Each structure stands twice: as C-alpha cells, then as structure tokens.
Image (tube, rainbow, N blue to C red):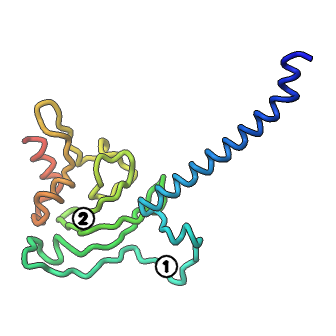
Amino acid sequence: MTMSERFKRDIWPECRAILAVAFGLSLTLYAKRVVEKLVTRKVISKEVFEHGLKKPDVPAPASVPVPYRPSLFSGFTPGRTARGSGVTYVESKRYGRIPVHYTRTVEGKDHTLWDHDEELSPQHRFPCPLLRVDTACLDCEFFVPRGGYRDEPVCAARYKLENCPDQYFQGLDDIRNELENS
C-alpha cells in the first residue's frame, strides 16, 4: 500500500471531518459577530433578534420627534434651527432602511442638518449631517479638502452644525466658499 492510498483511505476522511467542524464553528462565530454589530449599531433591536419579527398592525412613522422644549440658555430659534430629538429613517441602496437616532435638527434656507452619532457608511469620515448614506465624503460637494499647512479636511455641513447653527440664512455653499478661501 502506497502512502497516497493510505492517505485517501485512513487520513483524508478524518481531515474532512475536522475541516467540516472548523468551518461550522467559524461560520457560527462570524454570524454571531455580525448580529452583535447589527445590535450595537441599532440596525436591529435585541428583542427582534431574540423573539423574531412581528408584523406591526400600524405602519411605522417616518419620524418620531420629541416636542421642542426651549431652554433659557438655548441659542436656537424655535421652529427654525432646532427641534427635539427623535428617530428618522434613511433609505440606502446597499443597506436598506437605516434608523438614525438624532439629538436635534438644524434647519437652514436650503437644507436640514441632523445631529447624530450613527455611522451611516464606512466611506464617511464622521457622521453625515445631511444623511447621505450612498455618497462618500470625498464625493460630496460640501467636503472641503484641506492639506499641507492647513487643518484636517472639513465638511461644510458639519461645520455649520457645530459652529453656527443659528444662522438660518447662511447656506452650505456660503460656508463651503468661506472654508475654501480661509
């Protein structure tokens, strides 16, 4: 009996059994890791994963805002630049319908910005205030590349959300032009 015949008869079936068990374990661990990521990113809730999907009697609303409560120290104008927190849904070609939990919205003359911490796409450098899931930061018209002697790259929408949310009539094009010329 040659070595290859002995391998085919005795060793190969054991190797196949070991490989099948290893493949099954790695596939199970991968599925568990994917589900954990979906739960932590709030794509699916833990209850749905544990109890299964139930069809709702009433369709879910597109947005569930919390009523606006003005603060004494708030620099926002009610109805224009800030509303309460809530959940909105964004459609994506790649990921389907994504829930986005936002803390506030900032409305301008030509845009609405959403303040959130969700990673909508791996192509984004930071959470996109315009909720553009299928557009990479580098392809967005409001992304201002800065390099060399300047600071890091800047998003005009993110800049407005963080630095001047109460300026209703200042558009994102104006902010982008200011950032490019600074």
Please provide percent x and percent y for residue 68. 21, 80
Residues 86 and 96: in front is 86
**Cα–Cα span, label 1 and label 2:** 25 Å
The reply, left or right, for residue 10 in relation to residue 82 is right
User: For mark 1, does the 10 Å Cα neighbourhood hold few (<14), some (14 to 19), or many (20 or more) residues?
Assistant: few
Please state, as top left, top right, bottom left or bottom right, where the N terminus lies in the image: top right
Please provide percent x and percent y for residue 110. 21, 62
Please provide percent x and percent y for residue 76. 11, 72
For badge 1, the amino acid type reads Pro
Residues 128 and 14: in front is 14
Residue on which disc 2 sits: 112
For badge 2, the amino acid type reads Thr
The reply, left or right, for residue 65 in relation to residue 32 is left
Pointer 1 or 2: first along the chain: 1
Please state, as top left, top right, bottom left or bottom right, where the C terminus lies in the image: top left
Residue on which disc 1 sits: 59
Please provide percent x and percent y for residue 44. 48, 65
